[in-house]
Image: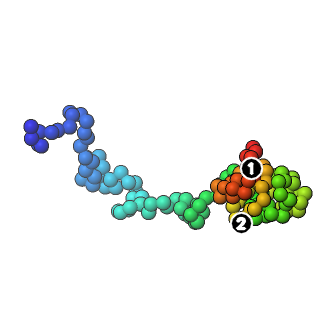
Amino acid sequence: MRLEDALPQAGSTKRRRRVGRGISAGQGASCGFGMRGQKSRSGRGTRPGFEGGQLPLYRRLPKLKHFPVLNRQTYTIINVEDLAKLPANSQVTLESLMAAGIVTTNDGPLKVLGNGEVSAAYQVSAAAFTQSAREKIEAAGGSCQVIE
C-alpha cells in the first residue's frame, strides 16, 4: 500500500466551492456574501471578541487575578498571645472572650491563629484552629476542641 492509495470513503467528501466563476457555477458575482456591508468585504468580518459595539466580554470581566468567593466563611479571629489575658486553666469560648472584653464583635465562629506564645493551659473550644495554634496550646498543656 502506498500513500496515494489511501483515499477517503466514496461520498464522504464534497467538492470545494469555487466562488466568483460566473452565474452558472452557483456562486457568481457576490459569491454568496450579499450585496454590501461589513461581512461582504474581503478579509475578516470583525476581529475576535467583537460584539457589535456592545462592551465585550473580556472588558466586562474583572481585571484583577481573583474572583471573589461567593459564600465566603468569615471568622472571629484571635491569636494565642491574647489568651494570656485570661486566667490559667479556664474554658475559652467566643462567649467567654466577649465577656472578658478581648473580643468586641461577633463576626462569626471563632478561629484561633498561632501568633505569639502561650504559657498557661487552656481548654479552647473554637470552630477552627491553625496548625501552629493547635501545637502551641497543646504544648502548654491545654486542649483544643473543634465545634461545628
Judge whether 70 appears above or below 10 on screen. below
Where in the figure is residue 103, as x and y percent of width and height?
A: 84, 61
Q: Residue at x 72, y 57 (%)?
A: 140
Q: Residue at x 72, y 65 (%)?
A: 117
Q: Residue at x 75, y 43 (%)?
A: 148
Which dot marks residue 60?
none
**35 and 47: which one is in front?**
47
Residue farthest right in this picture? 99
Where in the figure is residue 68, as x and y percent of width and height?
A: 64, 58
**Number of numbered discs overlaid on the protein picture:** 2
Q: Residue at x 61, y 58 (%)?
A: 67
| Colour pattern of the rendering | rainbow
Judge whether 17 appears above or below 38 on screen. above
User: Is residue 47 something one can see in this rendering?
Assistant: yes
Which dot marks residue 116?
2
**66 and 93: which one is in front?**
93
Task: Name which quarter of the figure residue 85 lies in.
Answer: bottom right
User: Is residue 52 something one can see in this rendering?
Assistant: no
Helix, strand or loop at label 2? It is: loop
As measured in the structure, the alpha-carbon distance from the residue carrying label 1 to the one carrying label 2 is: 17 Å
Kind of residue indicated by mark 1 = Ser
Left or right side of 119 for 44: left
Left or right side of 3 for 21: right
Q: Quadrant of the N terminus?
A: top left
Instruction: Identify the residue under disc 1.
Output: 143
Where in the figure is residue 86, as x and y percent of width and height?
A: 85, 60
Kind of residue indicated by mark 2 = Gly
Helix, strand or loop at label 1? It is: strand
